[in-house]
């Protein structure tokens, strides 16, 4: 018996701009792969690979509907990303506060 396939995490999944755009499309509504593929200048096979990575990260789920598979967003794993980014907000806030001080001080 072989080792199980390595599952992608949310950070790996969103690293690619195509996958981020797929997530944005699925945030609007659930879609079949044919509709998702129509938004990109790449093959349906390439989109399938992106959807597989997003599925492995539990960001999307595909459900069989007749002959097609309908994909929908599962946003819960994005919480991990939000929590990671929240630590760095302190640096952005600090920079904005400094900018505000500089701008107001010039007046």
Image: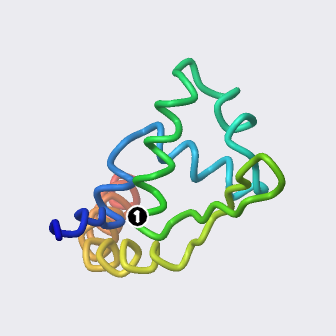
Q: Picture quarter containing residue 96?
A: bottom left
Residue that protrudes farthest toward the top in the picture: 41
For the N terminus, the image quarter is bottom left
| Dot 1: element | helix
67 versus 4 height, above or below:
above
93 versus 28 height, above or below:
below
Residue at the spot 68% in from the left edge and 62% down from the top edge: 72
Residue at the spot 30% in from the left edge and 57% down from the top edge: 102
Q: Picture quarter containing residue 28?
A: bottom right
| Near-viewer residue (77 or 86) | 77
Residue matched to label 1: 56
What percent of the width, then of the height, locates residue 51? 51, 49
| Near-viewer residue (54 or 92) | 54
What percent of the width, then of the height, locates residue 81? 37, 72
Residue at the spot 42% in from the left edge and 39% down from the top edge: 17
**Is 34 placed left or right of 18 in the picture?**
right
């Amino acid at each position: 018996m072989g080792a199980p396939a390595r599952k992608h995490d949310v950070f790996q999944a969103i690293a690619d701009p195509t996958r981020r755009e797929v997530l944005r499309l699925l945030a609007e509504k659930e879609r079949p792969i044919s509709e998702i593929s129509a938004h990109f200048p790449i093959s349906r096979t390439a989109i399938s690979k992106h959807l597989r990575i997003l599925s492995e990260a539990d960001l999307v789920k595909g459900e069989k509907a007749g002959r097609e598979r309908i994909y929908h967003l599962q946003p819960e794993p994005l919480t991990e990303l939000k929590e990671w980014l929240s630590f760095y907000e302190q640096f952005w806030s600090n920079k904005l506060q400094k900018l505000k001080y500089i701008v107001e001080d010039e007046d």
